[in-house]
Every structure is written in C-alpha cells, then in structure tokens.
Amino acid sequence: MTNDIDADQGLFTHIPVLLDEAVGALAIVPDGVYVDGTFGRGGHSQKILQQLGAAGRLWVFDKDPQAIRSASALKDRRMEAVHGNFAEMARVLCEHGAPMVDGVLLDLGISSPQIDDATRGFSYRFDAPLDMRMDNSQGISAQEWLASADEITIKKVIYEYSEERFAGQIAKKIVATRADRPISTTRELAQIIHASVKGGPGQQDSTSRTFQAIRIHINQELAHLKDGLKAASAVLKPGGRLAVISFHSLEDRIVKQFMRGDMSRDTVKTTLRGVRFLPPETLVSDWCELRKYTASEAERSRNPRARSAVLRVATKR
C-alpha cells in the first residue's frame, strides 16, 4: 500500500492494492447491496460508493476502532459501519433485516496505517509496546501471550504461521529471556530473534516472519478468515461476487480451497506443508467463474507490498 498522512486529521491513510481490479470484479450495480469486510481507511469503500446510486447500500466492517472512526467520518447515509470482525457479517446483517447482498470484498492482513503507527506494535521498525492486536480494545497483547505461553506452543505458532526454520531457537530464547526480564517492546523481541538466528541477511527475514506469525496468532486471522468466507457465502445471493485479496500463502491457500469446495471436506490446513488436495473432479463447490489477479508491473514498482498480493474472485451459484 502507498502511505501518506492526512494533514487535516493526522490520520494514516493508504491506497489499497489492486483497487480497480477488486472493485471492478464486484460488477457494482447502482441499487445493489455490498459488504466491505475490511474497511481500513476506506479506499475500497469510497470507490464502491462512487458507483452506487441513491438506493444502493454498503455495509463496512473492521476490528480496528481507528478504522471505524474513519468510516464514521464519511457520513454517507448509504453506508453502515460495524465495529467487528467480518466473520460476524451474517449475524449482523440478519439482525438488521438486511437483504441478501450482491458482493463481498475482503482485503486481508494488516493495513499500512496499522504498520506505520508505532504505538500498535506491529512493526520491528519502531521501538514500541509489543501489542499487535488489530482491535486493541479487547483480547491479550503479544506481550501478554509471550509472557505466558510455553516454549512448545511458541515454537509451534512461529513455525506453522511462517515456516521459520529457526522457530525452535527463537522460542527457546524467548523463554530464557523472559525468565530474567519481561519482553515488553518490539525492539526487545527483534533483538531476541537476531540473537537466535545465525548472522547475515536472513536475520531480517526471520524477524519479519516471526512478527507475522505472532500477529496472525494474536488476532486469530486464519480462523476468522475461514469463518468469514462461510459468512460471505451465507449472505451472498445467487450470482453475487466474492473478491478476496491475500498477501501470503497461508491466506491464499484457504481462499483458493474454499472457492474450489475443499473446505466442505475439511481438507484445508493452516501450515505451509502437508496440505492435502482432493482431485478436482471430486470437489463440490458453491462457486463458479473462479478468477485470479496479481498486480501489474507498474503497480509493483509503485508499491512493493503489491508484489505478494493475490486477488481471487468467485461467483455464487
């Protein structure tokens, strides 16, 4: 994502990856009903609203209280903002008596404003409290989890959510360090990782992977993704579109297998290895017209984060 600062509001803003492709894939109709399950700072939502007529409706969800404040600032009567996980969309829409929707968009992972706000504790580029919660109004922080989880659990989380080959060494060092002092900042965690990994450029990669793995665990991102995909299927009308942007292989594999129908047979795994694929002819899917997009060379040049982005689109049967 491309970052800048809103000088008037002092807020971090961003331009979403694959913006035109993702919104275009929804095939917006002016009087349609749509869900943006990851509002962020509203890039996708604003583009959807530009294509909606007076009778159109947009439901937006986000776990981040700051994102919901940004959504409320739009003051568009066609839009309803919900502070919550997109996995809750079916329940929320049902409770409000909303009709079946024409399209659902999910832009997964962490947003640029969250990364660039040092106080959130997502990035090792800053020395900040070790938080990592997307919704910092509830749940336990990364600091609290690292203070209480046993070595085997820490190792398992780091390996399964990043396939970091030094997961064992990193977990062991975390446990040894916390016996002497609390691990309370991002810099302290980064230093522990560096001390656990052999020298060279691989240290930064290990740090990035470990931070990613802990963040995924703290926010239960993959479990919520599975629930969110099922919720999207429940609220979409026949012919409705589901568009999902992912940024790493764990997310993308879940999305791909869901659209193929594998999840109904419980074959989706959340590790990079050991994934069991069923023969395509045996799959039963509620989806058709499956499409995949990646960023253009021009977008990748402008925005390095776009290099790993994958957009998958499917139509509800």
Image (spheres, grey):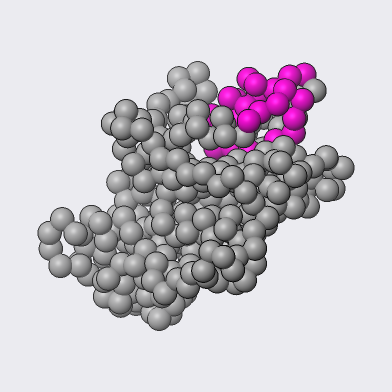
Residue 220 seen anywhere in this rendered image of the structure: no
Kindly give the residue lying farthest to the right in the view shown. Answer: 97
Q: Quadrant of the N terminus?
A: top left
Q: Quadrant of residue 182?
A: bottom left
Query: Residue visible at 60% across and 65% down?
Result: 283
Q: Magenta includes 209?
A: no
Name the foreground residue: 51 vs 85.
Answer: 51
Q: Position of residue 2 (x, y in %)?
A: 38, 30
Magenta stretch?
27-54
Name the residue located 31 percent from the left edge and 55 percent from the top edge.
208
Furthest-front residue in this view:
281
When asked about the image quadrant of residue 58, the answer is top right
Vertically, is 5 above or below 86?
Answer: above
State the image coordinates of residue 80 (x, y, percent, origin top left).
74, 33
In terms of depth relative to the viewer, which is nearer, 137 or 89? Answer: 89
Q: Is residue 52 magenta?
A: yes
> Is 161 positioned to the left or the right of 41 in the image?
left
Q: Which of these two is toward me, 102 or 207?
A: 102
Q: Residue at x 48, y 26 (%)?
A: 10
* Residue 305: x %, y % from top left: 36, 40
Left or right of 165 in this view: 55: right
Asked where in the image residue 26 lies, by quadrant, the reply is top right
> Can the viewer see residue 241 in this picture?
yes
Name the one closer to the observer, 251 or 188.
251
Location of residue 78 with respect to 201 vertically, above or below = above
Where is residue 38 drawn, in percent x and y?
58, 42
Residue at 71% in and 41% down: 239
| Residue 303 position (above or below residue 145) | above
Q: In this rendering, would 168 be left or right of 54?
A: left
